[in-house]
Image (cartoon, rainbow, N blue to C red):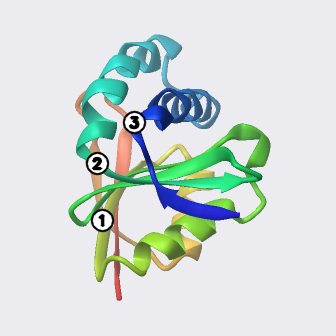
């Protein structure tokens, strides 16, 4: 297993992991929403983020993206979920920050539990303007 900074050549693969994982984890949101976000993810969000990829046998299986103190993305390819790779990426990014915040959909109970287990605290309930879904603002401090 290796964690490294992403390269431009990784972007297509990262968007695919994000897309497939988003559809699986957010079955309460219409697929068309995720389709509409693909281009922005590729051209806007990933390029503006500090992103690290997790590789197993040279294959990218997940990534974490941060913008300042905001954990903007944490995704593991569907076939590799549940094997501790998400925890590896969270631990990695915590070594680089003293404070992190993130938003997670309240209905994505698996993700909420994951972040609670990794010492994030629920700070506030919000409504995502784009989807109308309830989300949790969560925070971790060193």
Please tell me whether mark 2 or mark 3 is closer to you in this view.
3
Q: Position of residue 64 (x, y in %)?
A: 46, 54
Residue 83 vs 79, above or below: the answer is below
Residues at badges 1 and 3 in contact (C-beta under 8 Å)? no
- The residue where tag 2 is placed is 49
Q: Position of residue 27 (x, y in %)?
A: 59, 27
Disc 2 to disc 3, how far (Cα)?
12 Å
> Residue 122 location, x and y as percent?
38, 68
Q: Quadrant of the N terminus?
A: bottom right
Farthest residue in the bottom direction?
Answer: 142
Q: Is residue 36 left or right of residue 26?
A: left
Q: Secondary structure at mark 1?
A: strand
Looking at the picture, tell me which residue is in the foreground, 68 or 47.
47
Query: Which of the labelled discs sits on residue 40, or is there none?
Result: none
Residue of label 3: 8
Callouts 1 and 2 close, C-beta under 8 Å? no
User: Quarter of the image containing the C terminus?
Assistant: bottom left
Query: Is residue 10 placed above or below 111 in the rendered structure?
Result: above
Q: In terms of image quadrants, where is residue 133?
A: top left
Tell me what residue is drawn at x 72 percent, y 65 percent.
Answer: 84
Q: Is residue 107 above or below residue 54?
A: above
Pointer 1: what residue?
Answer: 101
**First in sequence: mark 1 or mark 2?**
2
Nearer-the-camera pick, 32 or 89: 89
């Amino acid at each position: 297993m290796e964690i490294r900074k992403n390269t431009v050549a990784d972007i297509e693969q990262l968007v695919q992991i994000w897309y497939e994982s988003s559809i699986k984890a957010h079955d309460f949101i219409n697929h068309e929403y995720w389709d509409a976000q693909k281009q922005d993810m590729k051209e806007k969000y990933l390029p503006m983020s500090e992103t690290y990829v997790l590789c197993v046998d040279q294959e990218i299986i997940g990534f974490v993206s941060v913008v300042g103190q905001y954990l903007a993305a944490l995704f593991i390819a569907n076939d590799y979920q549940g094997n501790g790779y998400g925890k590896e990426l969270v631990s990695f990014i915590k070594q680089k920050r003293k404070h992190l915040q993130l938003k997670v959909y309240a209905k994505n109970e698996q993700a909420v539990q994951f972040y609670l287990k990794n010492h994030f605290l629920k700070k506030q309930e919000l409504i995502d303007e784009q989807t109308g879904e309830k989300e949790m603002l969560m925070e971790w401090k060193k």
